[in-house]
Structures are given as structure tokens and as C-alpha cells.
Image: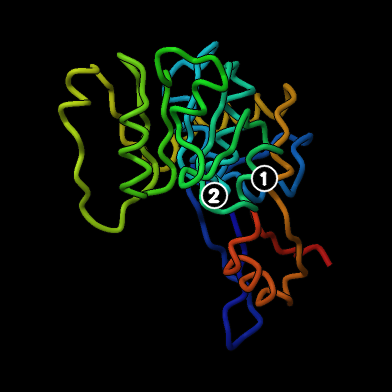
């Protein structure tokens, strides 16, 4: 039960929520990490759609959810995690979060990346986090035979897909939306308790009265997650 004051009086009247709408965090979960459980859930739901142990993973898009997916993939036992993004700040953040390599696709081809890492057959698992048609098609072109792709990024408009590449390479494509309540959150909690550290994705902290500075930081693109402190 949550008691909320209702203007114009100072009375409090009971408001009821279904018990299933409430999540109780384990006491050892950092409150800052708890505040980003929603996007973290997107990263975990996407990354754990397929088995990652020993696999080579390509992540297209190094936004905050993409870089958290990098950390999850490494924690889940991926061999290599390669990230593509145009933003140098985000590429650096991806490497701090566990990416083996983070490259600008305009400067470094994925063929070159595979040669550098000694990969012979393409990526086993692809995580599309950007919504970019160019990124998605580069992902399809660099998958191993029988590779698996999870899509979280949302394109702004319809995009063409090379279905011949999908069919002849026997690719599996799975759309991802949100997270699976509460199974995803159980997995998130266990991973954090077993050593997964996603705190580097929180790059900016402001008092809640400084919310505009938080939005300004987000608009630059040179940030990870921006959080507001309501504790004081």
C-alpha cells in the first residue's frame, strides 16, 4: 500500500497496487545500479536470448544498453565481444565495460576485425542495439553459418534486409521487447551478486534539482547513464 497526499487537503488516502507490481531489491544491490534496472533488463534480455559461452559476439550500437550487453556477454562467457559505434566516447565506454574491441565501422571493417582476432567463420551471436539499417545489414553480412541475432534497436523507418543472406546462412533472428518479468530480473540480481559490475555505465550524477544539467549531458551523446540523486 502506498499512501499519497491529495491536494488541496493534507489528508492521505490509501492507494493500492498489485503485489506483482512491486520488486524488492536484495539488500546488497547498489542503489545506483538499482535505479537503472529497467534498461539493464533490456540488455540482459537481449544478451541472454542465446547461449554465449565460448561464442564470438558482435554488438552493433554502444549506447548505454549496448555497453551493458557487452558486460553481460563477457560475464556469460563469450570469447570475443566486438562493438561497433560512430561515437568515440561510447566506444571507449564499451571497452571499459568489457568489449574486446570497439570500432568505428567507417574506419575499420568487420572483416579486418575478424582477421585481427583470428576468427575464421564470422560471429556466432549478433546483438543489434542501434536501430541503424546499415548496422543491421553489416551484422547480417558478418554472421557465421547458423548464427543467431537478437534485435532490440528500433529503426526509425522500414529497412531492407538481404533475405538471401539470412536464408542461405541459416540465420536465426529474434525480436526483443522489454524484459521478461520477473525471470530477467532474477538473472540480473544473480549476475550482480556473482561479480558483474555495470557501475561504469553510470557516468554522470546530479542532484534532482539539477535535472536540466542531466538532460544537457545526455544530449551531447558523451555519456552513459545519467542519474539523479533524491536522497538529500
Q: Give the total of numbered labels.
A: 2
Helix, strand or loop under label 2: loop
Q: Which quarter of the figure has residue 216? A: bottom right
Q: Is residue 5 left or right of residue 229?
A: left
Number of residues whose C-alpha sits closer than 10 Å to that of mark 1, classed few (under 14), some (14–19) or many (20 or more) = many
Specify few, some or many for label 2: CA neighbours under 10 Å numbering under 14, 14-19, or 20 or more.
many
Q: Position of residue 20 (x, y in %)?
A: 49, 41
In this view, the residue farthest toward the right is: 232
Q: Residue at x 22, y 25 (%)?
A: 166
The span from disc 2 to disc 1 (Cα, nearest Å) is 9 Å
Q: Position of residue 211 (x, y in %)?
A: 67, 74
Q: Which residue is mark 1?
A: 93
Label 1 sits on a secondary structure element that is helix
Q: Nearer the viewer, residue 207 or 58?
A: 58
Judge from the rendering whether residue 147 lies leftward or rightward of residue 206; answer left or right: left
Instruction: Choose between 205 and 230: the one closer to the eye.
Output: 205
- Which residue is at a point 48% across and 35% down the rendered structure image? 59
Is residue 203 depicted above or below 59 in this figure?
A: below
Where residue 124 sits: x, y (%)? 42, 18
Extreme-bottom residue of the structure: 8
Q: Is residue 228 left or right of residue 64?
A: right
- Residue under the image location 59 percent in, 29 percent down: 72
Give residue 156's position: percent from left, percent from top: 30, 58
Q: Is residue 32 above or below residue 141?
A: below
> Residue at (41%, 19%) from the top-left corner?
122
**Numbered mark located on residue 193 in the image:** none
Q: Are marks 2 and 1 in contact (CB under 8 Å)?
A: no
Q: Which residue is mark 2?
A: 63
User: Tag 1 or tag 2, which sits nearer the N-term?
Assistant: 2
Dividing the image into 4 quarters, which one contains the N terminus? bottom right
Q: Quadrant of residue 40?
A: top right
Amino acid at each position: 500500500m502506498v499512501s499519497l497526499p491529495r491536494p488541496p487537503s493534507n489528508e492521505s488516502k490509501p492507494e493500492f497496487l498489485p503485489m506483482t507490481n512491486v520488486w524488492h531489491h536484495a539488500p546488497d544491490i547498489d542503489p545506483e545500479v538499482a535505479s537503472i534496472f529497467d534498461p539493464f533488463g533490456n540488455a540482459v534480455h537481449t544478451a541472454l536470448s542465446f547461449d554465449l559461452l565460448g561464442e564470438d559476439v558482435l554488438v552493433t550500437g554502444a549506447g548505454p544498453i549496448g555497453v551493458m550487453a557487452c558486460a553481460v556477454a563477457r560475464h556469460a562467457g563469450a570469447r570475443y565481444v566486438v562493438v561497433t559505434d560512430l561515437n568515440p566516447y561510447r566506444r571507449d565506454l564499451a571497452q571499459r565495460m568489457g568489449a574486446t574491441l570497439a570500432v568505428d565501422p567507417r574506419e575499420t571493417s568487420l572483416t579486418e576485425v575478424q582477421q585481427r582476432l583470428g576468427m575464421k567463420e564470422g560471429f556466432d551471436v549478433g546483438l543489434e542495439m542501434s536501430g541503424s539499417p546499415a548496422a543491421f545489414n553489416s551484422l547480417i553480412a558478418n554472421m557465421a553459418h547458423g548464427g543467431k541475432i537478437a534485435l532490440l534497436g528500433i529503426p526509425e523507418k522500414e529497412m531492407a534486409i538481404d533475405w538471401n543472406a539470412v536464408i542461405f546462412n541459416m540465420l536465426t533472428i529474434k525480436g526483443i521487447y522489454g524484459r521478461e518479468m520477473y525471470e530477467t530480473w532474477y538473472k540480473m540480481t544473480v549476475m550482480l551478486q556473482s561479480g558483474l559490475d555495470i557501475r561504469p555505465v553510470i557516468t554522470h550524477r546530479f542532484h534532482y534539482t539539477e535535472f536540466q544539467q542531466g538532460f544537457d549531458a545526455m544530449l551531447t551523446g558523451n555519456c552513459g547513464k545519467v542519474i539523479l540523486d533524491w536522497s538529500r
